[in-house]
Image: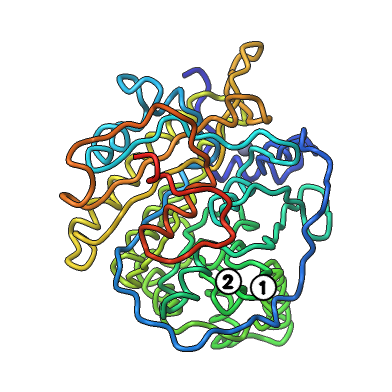
Amino acid sequence: MSTPPLDRRRFLTRSAAGLGALSTVLATGCDPQQQAAKEPVQAIPAEDVDLVGPRPPYKGPNVVLIRFGGGVRRRETVAFPDQTWCPFVVHELAQQGVLFTNVEIANKPGVSTSHGQGTLFILTGQYAHYEDFEKRPLAERFVSPIPTIFEYLRRTYDIPEYQTLIVNGEDRVNEDFYTFSNHHQYGIHYKSTVLSLYRFKTYLLREEVKHGNFSEPVRAQKEKQLREMEAKDYRTVDHTVQSPELDRFWEGWKQYYGTTGLVNPRGDRVLTALALRAIKELQPRLMMVNYQDADYVHWGNPHFYTRALAIMDDGIRQIYDAVQASESYRNNTVFVVVPDCGRDDNRTMSVPFQHHFNTKSAHEIFALIAWPRGQGPAKKTVVNRSLQQQISVTRTVGEIMNFATPHAAADSLLKVV
Ligand SMILES: [Zn+2]
């Protein structure tokens, strides 16, 4: 590798310093070749949800859903197993499951191969065109019109919100808000919740405003700052409703890592740390971990990509080890791994996989389902034949956890095994 990697703080400073609109595109991973909108998704106030009555407790397996993200294509992962950058996923985790090496994101008008979009395809089981709900350029505050897997799960079973988790990165605050859809039968009453450093910082500031002893101008300043942070959550009307379980979780995080942000791990490693603590303290039934750092290759250094693959792979190994160490998770947890999108294979560029501009290879991904020992196929199964769809993951999770996904458009991946 020729240039030293930018650390995250420098990276953020540089992007904040304003390298122009292009940098913003690169930093947010937005796809400038997005197709023109057909029917934009409107943001509807998330009220008027039809509530169901009492629901049975959930007794099925836990699912850890890994967004193997930041745009990851097949070549460095599953296409050449001897040269993979994620050996744990491909060689070890796959021993207990089925590796689908030919998953694709549909190539049709309006379907973008990008991070927020891919995440919503996985969450909802439908390909759709997404754009910012106020049509602000690059804002990417998406709202799904159809339910997410979390809503299906919580509408079917009596599971508290804090046990349906999305673990999210610090650079993608927009993706903190994919927790529920605008569907009238689902929506906010069945939402999931997010663990992220942004949420932690909001918690800290809220606690400070509540308990701090400030002069009036300082208090006013802090309250203003808190309102601004809370306003980023563009979908929650009442910010005063907090969860005691989550407050305890953040209090524990604060005790351990302090408040400076200098001690806790950064980047995708913080997602792993959050997921590990969540398993111990919150016991999520469905947890989605939205890894993202492979996307740093937008800055043109190929090592950002391959190193991120190895960090994610190690993170998944740590989460797997934590599952093995936990009595209630060990024989009762299924892993599902799938990228948000692929990456280009553009031979005219010095880094051929720098972007994910809707080219063929940006549509070409993979998926892995891994069961607890003895509960999956007798030996590693690789499905190379036939194309599976990324949106099949939704119904697959529904099948594993035994809930219906009526709005998902593709069959379960397990249909072809
Ligand atoms: Zn990107």
The residue that disc 1 covers is 230
In the image, taking residue 148 as reference, residue 21 lies left or right, namely: right
Q: Which residue is drawn at 64% across and 15% down?
A: 349
Dot 1 falls on a residue whose secondary structure is helix
Dot 2 falls on a residue whose secondary structure is helix
Q: Does residue 304 appear in this view? A: no
Q: Position of residue 140 (x, y in %)?
A: 72, 52
Earlier in the chain: of badge 2 and badge 1, it is 2
Q: Position of residue 172 (x, y in %)?
A: 61, 52
Q: Which residue is drawn at 68% across and 69% down?
A: 182
Q: Which of 75 and 253 is in front in this view?
A: 75
In the image, taking residue 322 as reference, residue 261 lies left or right, namely: right
Scheme by which the image is coloured: rainbow
Tags 2 and 1 touching, CB below 8 Å? yes
Quadrant where the C terminus sits is: top left
| Vertical side of 84 occupied by 8: above or below | below
Q: Where is residue 373 in the image (x, y as percent from the top left)?
A: 17, 50
The residue that disc 2 covers is 202
Q: Position of residue 295 (x, y in %)?
A: 56, 37
Q: How far apart are marks 2 and 1 (CA)?
A: 7 Å
In the image, taking residue 111 as reference, residue 3 lies left or right, namely: left
In the image, taking residue 66 as reference, residue 177 lies left or right, namely: right
Of the four image quadrants, the one with ligand 1 is top right
